[in-house]
Image: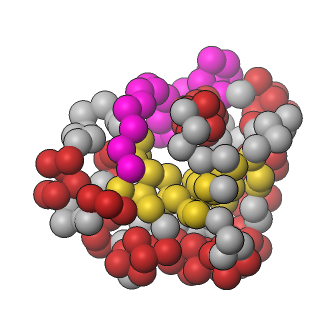
Amino acid sequence: MTRALLGGSFDPVHAGHVAMVVHVLRRALADEVIVIPNARSPWRDEPSAGAGDRLAMCRLAFAGMAAVTIDDREIFAGRPVRTVETVEALVAERPDVSWRVVIGADHLARFGAWHRSDRILELAQLLVLGRSGAATDAAAVTAAGLPAERVVLTPFEHAVSGSAVRATLGAGGDGRGLLPPAVADYIAARGLYRSA
């Protein structure tokens, strides 16, 4: 069995995130996907929505997908959690499965700068999903200084980005078409992402 970890701020979780998970499962790149929203990314500013709201939106976005689990460990840590910590914990809990860490191709070149990236690659393969404008080929893996046997490349295209969604919502749009419907409803009901 292969499990894939998809971590992030999910601020908010959008149609692109759902498409990524569907792609991974339909292409049999993993049997299950563990979605792990973080309390705060070490790479980004404070999220616009609170941890509880982002966790709730993830649960709504992936409701009904039996092969997807929402894991709240990083949210409840209440601090930035490095990917290596989460991977080590998951492998300790389920050493009987193979693990993959899902990243977009735009993160491939800087993966070596991740905290203890070598340890992550010891425990899990990288599953790199193509992204417009980012190289997704063997040359890109070599340029990133990563061992080819620990990296799985897959073509993938989806135009939705979190910053575009936040901009749309901040300008008064409802995000329909960019967000899973249940997430759009949740955001509207809670008044999230509205500009002051």
State the extent of the magenta-drawn residues as a range: 152-179
User: Within the magenta stretch, is there residue 139?
Assistant: no
52 vs 172, left or right, is right
In x, y percent, where is residue 66? Answer: 82, 41
Instruction: Residue 159: say if magenta.
Output: yes
The residue lying at 76 percent from left, 44 percent from top is 67
Residue nearest the viewer, comparing 108 with 30: 30
* Residue at the limit of the structure toward the top, as seen here: 177
Question: Can residue 149 be seen from the camera position used here?
Answer: yes
Q: Give the percent coordinates (x, y) of residue 50.
A: 71, 58
Q: Is residue 103 left or right of residue 47?
A: left
Examine the rendered structure and indicate whether residue 16 appears above or below residue 72.
above
Residue 183, position as x, y percentages in the image: 76, 33
The quadrant holding residue 18 is top right
Q: Nearer the viewer, residue 23 or 63?
A: 23
> Is 115 located above or below residue 60 in the figure?
below
Point out residue 149 in the picture as x, y percentages from the top left corner.
32, 60
Q: Residue at left 75%, top 46%?
A: 68
Quadrant of the image occupied by residue 65: top right
Quarter of the image for residue 23 reads top right
